[in-house]
Amino acid sequence: MNAIIEVEDLHHSYGDFTAVNGISFRVHTGEIFSFLGPNGAGKSTTINILTTLLPLQRGRVRVNGYDVRKEKKRVRESIGIVFQDEVLDGDLTVWETLEFHGRIYGMPRAERRERIEEMLKLADLEEKTEERVKYLSGGMRRRLEIARGLMTRPAVLFLDEPTLGLDPQTRYRIWKYIEKVNREGTTIFLTTHYMEEADSLSSRISIIDHGKIVITGTSEELKNSIGKDLIYLETVNKEKASQIIGSFSEVRGVRDSLRGLEVSLEADGQRFLPRLIVSLEKEGVEITSISLKKPTLDDVFLHYTGRELRDEGPQGKKVAMRRRRGR
Amino acid sequence: MNTAFLTVYWRDMIRFRRFKPMLFSTLVQPILWMAFFGIGMSSNFDRFSQFVKLPPGIESVDYLTFMAAGVIAMTTLFTSLFGGISLLFDKRWGIMKEMLASPMPRTHILWGISLSGVTKALIQAALIMSFGLLIGVKFFSGYSAVEVLISLLGIAIFVTVFSLGFLFLSAGITMRLESMEGVQGIMTLLTMPLFFSSSALYPVEGFPSWLRAISVVNPLTYLVKGIRYFAIGEDFFAMGTHYTYSIYDVLLSLGFLTIFALLTYLFAWVTFRRACPGEGFGD
Ligand SMILES: Nc1ncnc2c1ncn2[C@@H]1O[C@H](COP(=O)(O)OP(=O)(O)OP(=O)(O)O)[C@@H](O)[C@H]1O
Ligand SMILES: [Mg+2]
């Protein structure tokens, strides 16, 4: 597959603090690639380097085939960015915001005007065209920012925590919107705190912590990598079931749970479950109910970073709100 | 040709029109200077200068006319020095990041901001002249229509070149600083000595030698000279002082201002080339 972003051994320090500590990854053309990591992991720093907003200190980075150190202008022409912080001039109207953007990217007038119409429709802001940006709701402002990032038809769109501080409905709408944009051919590089977001949107995910990539893969691969598929099984004959289950090499352990048994697996539970059912029935163990619980991305995250996202919970939420500057 | 600077200009002018209090103070402040300081002081100064003996047949230029040129110069100085401040807002709202991440050449930010600063300065100069003529400033007296036009053009050129010099300086300084307080502090610190060591409001001939030395390198002195040459004439008396300007003086003044603008441009250019939004501000 073609790599539209290639990063090799990237380092970045602020003074003597190392924020990015030797990361390498590739983003394939057409995919949605996510950086998932706690506060201060180095996500924004990486994005800033990839988008030429920070100088490349060490390593090799190519975006859309261009070297970010030597071909800055080409890189800039290839990308769209939605920053983590809100970047909007509240005193301009929605239309002026897009017009300004198109003009600084050198889009010819006719194309620009046409694109503005398209973008307004896509972002569902047609009725707000002449409204000053400061009078838009937070979700509308974010949609406007995403539309602006897309306006120049970038090969890659960078989204730094696009749904931070938004309500679930708005967040969901923005996800749909991102998917739509991606289907139309834009490669997306996303950073997020939200497991759910990374899980539902991404083709592939890198978990990043303390400036290092801990693991990269599809959400499935990440979950399977921790080998913790769980099977919940209800039966009257717990003893016998437990014995049979324990004899499989795929099984890591069997525990008594409230109503039945909880089986943790080393292997892919989806493949294992049918075999287990068959052999239990052959031995005459009657199963009342059975369910397979896939480990969530939360489990994966905990496994690899040894801690929960520091941004979750009521206190974390406050941090998030503060970072998105209200005006 | 890349015309991104026109876009930066376009946006800055929208903001200028939209911020009503700002627009109001920009337009009204110079008029207040003329109305209060000008009229107030001129009755005083004109009384004193009656006692100065002038060669027969020569009439002294009244104070209001003398200082009107100074008010244009001073207003241009203020507007230009504070012209770069909009960059601070751009940094704060992140628009600077948007611009720096775009393929637009970075110097266009500087050009666009400067162009809008010059526009504001020219509007103010025009306003001061119109209002001045209304309250009795004797600019262009005895000029033919063509001479008036040439003079207006001359004044516009002086104001533009001077304004650019200080806009570049202001933009360069603002780009390096983070806080409004810092920028305002520096600008205020600069205005005082520039303003009071110039001949904007009184002749420098009576200054002690060290102050005169400062006034010789003060760009404001040369702007005032240029405006007076075009608006009042090449040979006149004002406040007991005989002023003669040759065309060479005027060209030399323009040359000085041009060199000043080139130097400040260099300073701003270096600053903008190095500008790196991820380092100094943002997240
Ligand atoms: N301009 C800066 N100067 C000094 N240190 C910085 C600067 N920007 C970021 N850092 C530090 O670098 C580390 C990584 O920051 P970065 O913004 O990349 O994290 P992040 O993964 O985007 O976090 P978040 O999820 O909170 O946005 C943090 O420890 C941060 O304090
Ligand atoms: Mg970040």
Image (cartoon, rainbow, N blue to C red):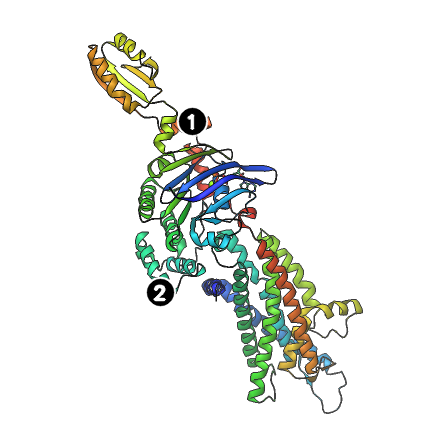
Q: Nearer the viewer, residue A173 or B142?
A: A173
Disc 2 element = helix
Protein chain holding label 2: A
Indicate the quadrant where residue A36 lies: top left
- Residue, far right: B209
Q: Residue A302 got which mark? A: 1
- Residue, far bottom: B57
Residue placed at 60% from the left, 84% from the top? B140
Indicate the quadrant where residue A296 lies: top left
Q: Residue B188's spot in the image, x, y percent?
A: 64, 60
Report which residue position mark 2 lands on. Answer: A110
Residue A246 in the figure: left or right of residue A312: left
Disc 1 element = helix
Residue A60 in the figure: left or right of residue A156: right
Amino acid at pointer 1: Leu
Q: Residue B227 got which mark? A: none
Amino acid at pointer 2: Ala
Protein chain holding label 1: A
Q: Nearer the viewer, residue A187 or B14?
A: A187
Q: Nearer the viewer, residue B254 or A158?
A: A158
Look at the image and tell me whether residue B36 can be seen.
no
At label 2, counting other C-alpha atoms closer than 10 Å, the crowd grade (few under 14, some 14-19, many 20 or more) is few
Is label 2 in contact with label 1 (beta carbons under 8 Å)? no
